Image (tube, rainbow, N blue to C red):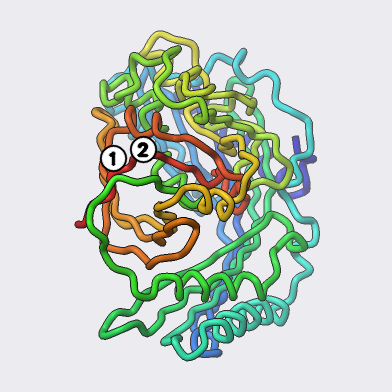
Amino acid sequence: MNKINKQQQNFNELADWVIDRTLKSGANGCKVNLSKTRFVDIIYRERRPDVIKEATTQSLSLEVFVNNRYASQSTPDLRKTTLESFINDVIDNAKIVEEDPFRTLPDPEYYKGQTNENLLLNDPSYGQHTPEERHDIVKKVEDACLKNGGDKVISVEAEEYDQHYEEYVKTSNGFEGSTESTEFWAGAEMTAQDEGDRRPNGYNYMGSRYFGDLPSLNDIGRIAAERTLDLMGGNKIPSETLPVIIESRNVATIGNGFLNALAGANIQQKRSFLADKRGQKVASDVFTVIDDPFIPKAFGSKYYDGDGFPARRRELITKGTINEFLIGWYYSRKLECEPTSSSVSNLIIPPGHRSVDEIIKELGRCILITDFIGGNSNSTTGDFSIGIIGKLYDKGQFVQSVAEMNIADNHLNFWNKLVEAANDPWIYSSARLPSLVFEDVIVAGV
C-alpha cells in the first residue's frame, strides 16, 4: 500500500469526521471516498495552441446504508459547514428508496490481505514539469506527424495530457485504502486527402505512468501518420471466409463482449450467455485470460477494488475453460455465492512467439484488422456484429486497404476459432493483450 502523504492524512481526518456525523445522523453504515485530481490538457492544431486546460478538482462521495436502504451522492464542497447538510440529504434520500435486503457493506473479513507492495503508480517528479516542456511535447508529436504525412495531410491535431490523482477510501466497518497515481499521454490525430471526397482519419496515442517512460515523441507522431496513410484507398472486397488478425490495440473492443457476460449483474439478471458455463470449455486452448493487478507501473494495477476487497491475481479463463465470474459483494448476496470481484485490473492473454509480420507471411490470404467501427454485442445470446477497417494480404504481400466490411458471429463460436497469439501485447492500456489470429472468419460487405 502507498505511504499516506499529507493530503491523504487530511482526507483521513475528514473521512473520520464524515463517518462519525453520518452514523450519528441515523445511518447503519457508510463509505466515504475522497479524491483530488489535477490535470493538464494541451492540443495543437496547425502548429498553434487550440486548447489549453489546467484544473484541480476534488470530490467527496458518500454511500449510506439505512435499514436496508441505500443512497449515494457526491459533492465538490469539502467544507464541514456544508457537509453537515449534505450528509443529512443523502440519509433522507436513502430513507425514501425501496428496501433492498442485499444492500449492505461487505463483511469485514473480505477486507483482509491488501498488499503492501509498491506498484509504482505515482511519478514523484510530476510537479516538476513546466508548461514549456508540455508545449514542446505537443510540438514534437505534431511535427513528426506532419513530416510523415507529407502532401496528403489535411489537418493534424496533436495532444499532451497528464494527470495526478489521489484517493482515500474508508468505511464505517473497517476498510481503509489509499491510492496516488500519475499518467502522461501524447498523441496525434490526422486527416488525409484520399481520392475524390474521401478523408480518412487515423490516430495514435501512447502513455505511461512515469514521464520518463513515454515512448519516443517522434515515433508517436510518425505512427499516427502511418496509420492514417494505411487507410488510403480503403474499400470493400467480396464477402469471403478467411483468417483475420485483430491488432493488439483493438482486441479489447471485441473481447469486452465476451467478458461482459462474466459480470454478476448480467448473470443474476439472466442476461449472460455464460451463466451456466463455469467450469466448461467454451473457447480454444489459446484463450487464457489473466487478471493481474500487481504489474508495476501498469494502468490497471491497484490495491483494492470498489468493494474494498484486496486486489489479487486470478486466471479467469484457462485454455478456453471458465474458472471465475466477476461478482462483487452485492450480487454475491443475490446469487447466494462467494464474491470474487466485480471489476478487473490488467487483463492479459499470454503472448505467443511470432510477430504479426511473421504470421502474415504464413497465412496466405488474410485481413489484419486495425480498427473497429460501431458494432454491438448481445450479452444474453452472445451474438455480435461489428464493422472493421484493415489491410488485406495475400502470400505475405499487401493487396489493399479494407473498409466498409463487417464481421458477425456468436462469441461461443468465434473464440473457438482463435488459433494463435502474437508476441506484441499492447502495454498502453489496462488491456495488455497481443494481436490474435482467428481462422475461418466470414468477412462481409456492409
Find residue 218 and report its horizontal and vertical position in percent: 66, 75
**Residue in the foreground of this view, choosing between 418 and 192:** 418
Q: Which one is nearer the viewer's eye here, 441 or 280?
A: 441
Q: Quadrant of residue 352?
A: top right
Question: Which image quarter: residue 382?
Answer: top left
Tally of numbered tags: 2
Q: Position of residue 190 (x, y in %)?
A: 46, 77
Instruction: Look at the numbered discs 1 and 2 and tell me whether their residues touch, using CB distance below 8 Å.
Output: yes
x and y, in percent, of residue 305 in the image: 57, 31
Image coordinates for residue 387, horizontal then vertical, percent: 29, 54
Residue at 67% x, 18% y is 112
Which numbered dot is residue 185? none
Q: Which residue is mark 1?
A: 377
- How far apart in space, not on screen, are marks 1 and 2 (Cα)? 6 Å
Residue nearest the observer in this picture, 101 or 50:
50
Q: Is residue 319 left or right of residue 393?
A: right
Crowd band around label 1 with a 10 angstrom C-alpha radius: few (<14), some (14–19), many (20+): many
Q: In this figure, which residue is indicated by the disc labeled 2?
A: 257
